[in-house]
Image (tube, rainbow, N blue to C red):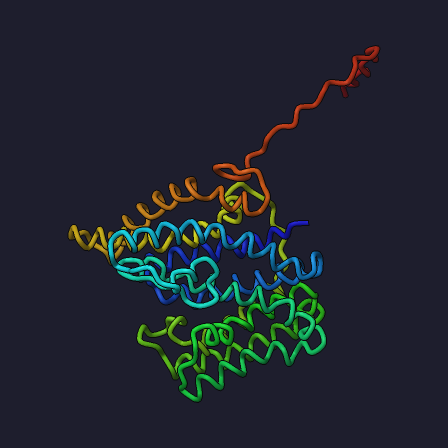
Amino acid sequence: MRNRYLDLLRAVATVRVVIYHITGWAAFTVVLPAMSVMFALAGSLMAASLDRFGVWAVERRLRRLLPSLWVLAAIAVTVMLATGTSSWNTMLLLWGFPIDTPEATGWWVQGLSHTWYLRDFLWMVLLSPLVLPVYRRFPLATILTPYLALIVITMAGRTVPPVAQSLALYGGAWLLGFAHHDGHLERLGRRRLLGIAAAVTVAAFAWITTHPGPRGWDLNDIPLGNALWSAAFILVVLGCLRPVISGNRVLTVLNARALTIYLWHVPVVVAVTQFGERHGLPIIGWVGISWRLTVVAVLLTGFVLLFGWIEDVAAGRPPVLLPGRRIPIPVSPAPAGPREPEPAVSLR
């Protein structure tokens, strides 16, 4: 049975990511650490898929992830080659299977800057069949491993490969998704979870306040603070809160098109912002944010209508422009039988 609460979290996180990239408001990273939440949700769903399909769950996840990326990458690579900003090389092949950061040049350096998420998602999917059995044997040690690794990396001040940095930063959220699926968070009890979350929150904000980034409290610039605060947030929203959410069309659309929205929103935001700068339009402030938010919403809707059906095909669903439409099922009328007399109505 589909968990509509998880759908709600994914939908809110997706919208939050888009709005953050338009506004740049650091407060959004604190109010909702969206990327960590999305990794936690994906970890929970990946554990469920592994339990159901075994190692074939990896193929199923990749099949749902890669086609939408291939379409965007094909357009980007074609433009890069046609404009001469890039020449053909093997690094471009990584767009087919991004186990490392694929090459982007020219305008696409900004337009594809967000695809690190798919690279890291790919690695976590590939590692999950190996990590899930280890987690189930040593749950606490497994969850603590990425956080300890991030502490070591941070304290040592060393630069590590981007994939290793991201696995340390977001791997804990993915593993908390395992804990959610296996019911470990629920079995800890609400009071204990809140106590753990409170302790982690204190540690997170002690680090954030003493180690602010170049943009102040923007957690994207403070990896350790980001990971700790995200862990506390996930413990509460996945372990303590279990509201009953009814399905609706907006929730269905946002979940069925979450990957398309994520992939295309940054190119749209960058293009709209550069257009405004080139024509002297306001970019910041309520006026600048309002008109850009409106234009981005309209253009992004167009891209969702244009490319969103790829997610349906990848998931084995019939392709539609917008999912969630209720299609009435024709029912053949039953043969008419003898009509029974209607009961008398008593008026009192």
- The residue lying toward the viewer, choosing from 108 and 294, is 108
Spot occupied by residue 148 in the image (x, y as percentages of width and height): 54, 83
Q: Judge whether 139 appears above or below 18 on screen.
A: below
Please state if 346 lies on the left or on the right of 295 as rendered. Answer: right
Please state if 183 lies on the left or on the right of 314 as rendered. Answer: right
Q: Judge whether 336 appears above or below 266 on screen.
A: above
Residue drawn at the location 59% of the way across and 69% of the way down: 127
Spot occupied by residue 66 in the image (x, y as percentages of width and height): 50, 54
Q: Locate the C terminus by quadrant.
A: top right
Q: Residue furthest bottom?
A: 156
Report how many numbered discs are placed on residues in the image: 0
Spot occupied by residue 206 in the image (x, y as percentages of width and height): 45, 82
- The residue lying toward the viewer, choosing from 237 and 97, is 97
Residue drawn at the location 39% of the way across and 64% of the way down: 90
**Residue 237: in sight, yes or no?**
no
| Residue 210 in which image quadrant | bottom left
**Residue 135: in sight, yes or no?**
yes
- The residue lying toward the viewer, choosing from 214 and 78, is 78
Spot occupied by residue 190 in the image (x, y as percentages of width and height): 66, 69
- The residue lying toward the viewer, choosing from 57 and 210, is 57
Q: Residue furthest left?
A: 280
Residue drawn at the location 36% of the way across and 55% of the way down: 266
| Residue 345 in which image quadrant | top right
